[in-house]
Amino acid sequence: MTSTRVQPFEDVAPALVDVAMGRTPADLVIRGARWVNVHSGEIVPGTDIAVKAGRFAYCGPDASHAIGEDTSVVEADGRYVVPGLCDAHMHVESGMVTVTEFARAVIPHGTTSMFIDPHEIANVLGLPGVRLMHDEAMAQPVNVFVQMPSCVPSAPGLEEAGAAITPDDVAEAMTWPNIVGLGEVMNFPGVAANDATMVGAIAATRKAGKTVGGHYASPDLGRAFHGYVAGGPQDDHEGTRMEDAVARVRQGMKAMLRLGSAWYDVATQVRAITELGLDSRNFVLCTDDCHSGTLVREGHMDRVVRHAIGQGLKPITAIQMASLNTAEHFGLAREIGSVTPGRRADFLLVSDLAALTIDAVYAGGQLLAEAGRLVADLPAYDYPDSAKNTVKLGKTLAASDFEIAAPAGVNAATVRVIGVVENQAPTKALTAELAVSDGLVEPDEAQGVAQIALVERHRGTGGVVNGFVSGFGYRGPMAMASTVAHDSHHMIVVGTDREEMARAANRLGEVGGGVVFFAGGEEKALIEMPIAGLMSAERCEVVADKADRLIEAMREAGCTLNNAYMQHSLLALVVIPSLRISDKGIVDVDRFEVVDLFVS
């Protein structure tokens, strides 16, 4: 695998041998460490680690033979040397920032390898957008591997995205130097039905000898699940129950357990290890989606590992699940995932293993962060104009665009309602009886039912689809709009007042995308995301501060959900049950069909 910061193993192997033999001095030696060995599952005290040309050359009891006049020597004083942490599945765009700014935020938290699926930008800009993020990823001082998006749009026939990815696009991407596999295959009914696009994309990936990412977002573990597994996906991060993890592992998949900003799926599934005794080497940790506030305030993969330890895993087991297990899954165990000779020298100095207190972060043998602060220089990465100005509304929206006409002659209407589930990606398919005023169906604060709208923003059609959502708890006149709307990334507007909804939508049209919150006729919070309407060009800390203001505005309007913004952003994700909204209408994901808003 190509790296811009570490030379290929075959080019430096003789130098590594010379260091191990004492013929050549190392560039760096860590002395007196406790070696967290994820291969043997043990902690080896009194270990010295020698690094040459960005790779480990020696791991043993005494590296004094590798110390020369110019060797940098770091005294570990009994601290742990831990492999750099790997995030097995994630979307940079969910952090609201670019790859560079994401790396800047997570490096101090010990993340040295990320496996990113840029299907958010792919839904807006197609293959050229993926290439932009691929190239930015290669410019980082840590490993940012890319999985080629597989499902753009995620569910053909149920939504229209801003672009489409074809099997030919996938085949082309497999020739790029930093592509490690196919991103999550979300069209699970398509795989089970042998859809030609899915079959072609998976075949192109397998022919290239790379990994096929999975996404089976259904509780049905019957024939449909078995058909999906038979189609080729090799992992899955959509499990929420212990039986989901068990089923994946028994079928030869890797169960990816995620802890993101709003997805808390580790605790239930890790019981497959702690209670049932399943082999932990077939489990992997990931984040999937983390927004900037979580990264800055709480952490990244260090947060996930601590959480897994808190659920009863031994520290070394949790670390394996965030290092070696990930590397092996993607066929990269000879490059990353452990502190062993020949691998890239990505490691952490940790003073408390159970608490994962990270004192220093190294990647390619270079010190990148110390005491929780980045010490390396990461130059800003500039995106071209072609990646901006992507929000095309086609007109100035008015309150009338958000009106929902009731069936003729009724005083109340029974409607389908998208029910948000706190800390989980799936929604509930609910119904509610709502009042009709002047022929229009109204949201109901007492029932907790707000209005939701999807505004087409890729082609400027002026199209608006309206529906209802519950679970946010908003009170008083308000509206929140976002052009981050997985996966097709139109604009989602949730509100209790049609005038406010129009204001919010038009404001995002003015700034080129992002998230905005209006209440009482005033703009309470705004996060500008001009890059594809998905990412900010600002520092992660700045975006996190703006996100804090957004969360506060939501709370002031009555929303008490944990990370409600993440819930908002998934309301159009038509590949996760049960009820969603798209530019085609209200979607019953359990049946994979568009349904009428009104229940007869």
Image (spheres, rainbow, N blue to C red):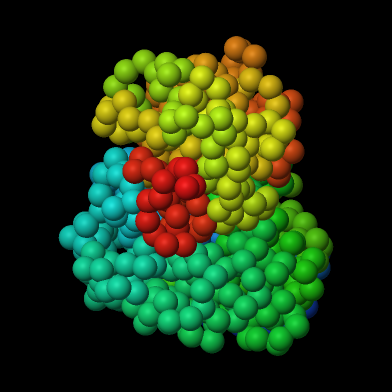
Foreground pick, 44 / 539: 539
Q: Quadrant of the N terminus?
A: bottom left
For image coordinates 40% across by 40% down, the residue present is: 489
Number of numbered tags placed on the structure image: 0
- Asked if residue 456 can be seen in this view, the reply is yes
Q: Quadrant of residue 7?
A: bottom left
- Asked if residue 74 can be seen in this view, the reply is no
Q: Quadrant of residue 155?
A: bottom left
For image coordinates 18% across by 60% down, the residue present is: 168
The percent coordinates of residue 80 (x first, y second) are 74, 67
For image coordinates 28% across by 27% down, the residue present is: 460
Residue farthest toward the left in the current orientation of the protein: 168
In the rendered structure, the answer to whether residue 405 lies left or right of residue 522 reads left
In the rendered structure, the answer to whether residue 377 lies left or right of residue 398 reads right
The percent coordinates of residue 461 (x first, y second) are 27, 28
Foreground pick, 115 / 265: 265
In the rendered structure, the answer to whether residue 248 lies left or right of residue 12 reads right
Residue farthest toward the front in the current orientation of the protein: 409
Q: Against 311, is 291 above or below?
A: above
